[in-house]
Amino acid sequence: MPSTVEQLSPSRVKITVEVPFAELKPALDKAYRDIASQVNIPGFRAGKVPPLIIDQRFGRGMVLQEAINHSLPELYGQAIQENNLNPLGEPDVEVTKLEDNELVEFVAEVDVRPDFEVPDFASIEVQVDPVSIDEAAVEEQIDLLRQRFGSTVDVDRAAAEGDIVTIDLIGSKNGEEVEEATAEGLQYKIGSGGMLDGLDEAVTGLSAAESATFSSELVGGPLRGETMDIKVTVHKVAQQELPEVDDEFAQLVSEFDTVDEMRADLRDNLVNMGRLEQAAGARDKVLEAVISQIDIEIPEKLLKSETEARHQQIQAQLDQAGLSLDQYLE
């Protein structure tokens, strides 16, 4: 099966393939069998209609088209292998010549991986930040453990920063309550943020059974971006009691018997994490350096399809989150 390759650009080729009719015979026989099994012609059993009758009833062209369509993927794949091409994406295929009982010619245009030279890696130098773990990072890990294993105790006083309050929220607009902006029995740590702007200020200083009203923009749900009047009612104020950092605490939260052993292990873990981040940073910088030294043309069709695929992926994630693209970009 002779084929020729014409380089249209550094990243696109045109493959012209001539197929002797003998190579189409298996596909042609299969097309006749398939058609014979699907038609009902008086005087012939199902599947036993002769090719001549099929040509007379349905036309030789229909049979040829079915045989060619069946054979094209395999013929195209053979041409790719014979010419050592690396296709990127699906080809544009057109049958350019059809001489019955002689040959079939088709042309396929496809993006291919362009030739490029990779620089000598021994010449690549990058700088990464050294791994540095200070005691503040270790203390931060210990504080996280204390909070995880801490307990809460109800208190009979006004709420302050760091307290955990149980609250109800009622949103209203123009004096009318909005069901979608209403919630009951929420637990919220004052100062943690992330719920509603103005909530920290509103609940600070409130005791159980007291309320306050403030205006805020909703940050989630179907009414995201709407500004409403929010009434917050505190039902319970609790403070978090954190365990002392001693040997008993170390035995509770780790496999070690002493605080010193626990601290050393936390420090080692942070160092290992830092080294992993350092290695990832080095990898990315080396890749950037290599790419900067490579002159390569990206196929426009491939770039467009990849951009569209990523856009669709982001849009699907935004749809699940109930966000529009404009809200996300804002």
Image: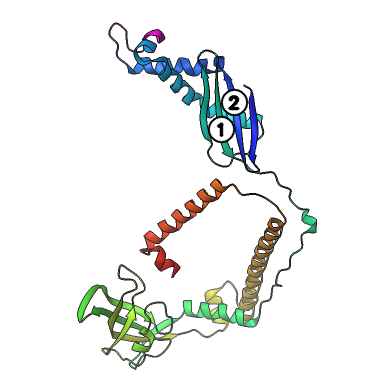
- In the depicted structure, whether residue 289 falls above or below residue 78: below
Which residue reaches farthest right?
122
Task: Indicate which disc residue 155 carries.
Answer: none
x, y percent for residue 1:
62, 21
Q: Where is residue 294 in the image (x, y as percent from the top left)?
A: 71, 53
What secondary structure characterizes most of the magenta part? Answer: loop
Element at label 1: strand
Q: In this view, does 181 lie to the left or right of 256?
A: left
The quarter of the displayed image where residue 137 is located: bottom right
The image quadrant that residue 192 belongs to is bottom left
Residue shown at the point (74%, 65%) measured from the top left: 126
| Residue 108 numbered mark, or none | 1
Q: In which quarter of the image is residue 170?
A: bottom left
Q: What stretch is highlighted in magenta?
A: 42-53
Looking at the picture, tell me which residue is in the foreground, 218 or 252.
Answer: 218
Q: Residue 17 carries which label?
A: 2
Residue 47 is one of the magenta-drawn residues: yes
Q: Is the residue under label 1 in contact with that under label 2 (CB below 8 Å)? A: yes
In whole angstroms, how far apart are the C-alphas of marks 2 and 1? 8 Å
**In-front residue for pair 22/7:** 7
Q: Can residue 48 be seen in this view?
A: no
Q: Eyeballing the image, is 95 above or below 153?
A: above
Residue 113: give x, y in percent of width and height.
Answer: 64, 43
| Amino acid carrying mark 1 in the image | Ala
Q: Describe the element under mark 2 as helix, strand or loop.
A: strand
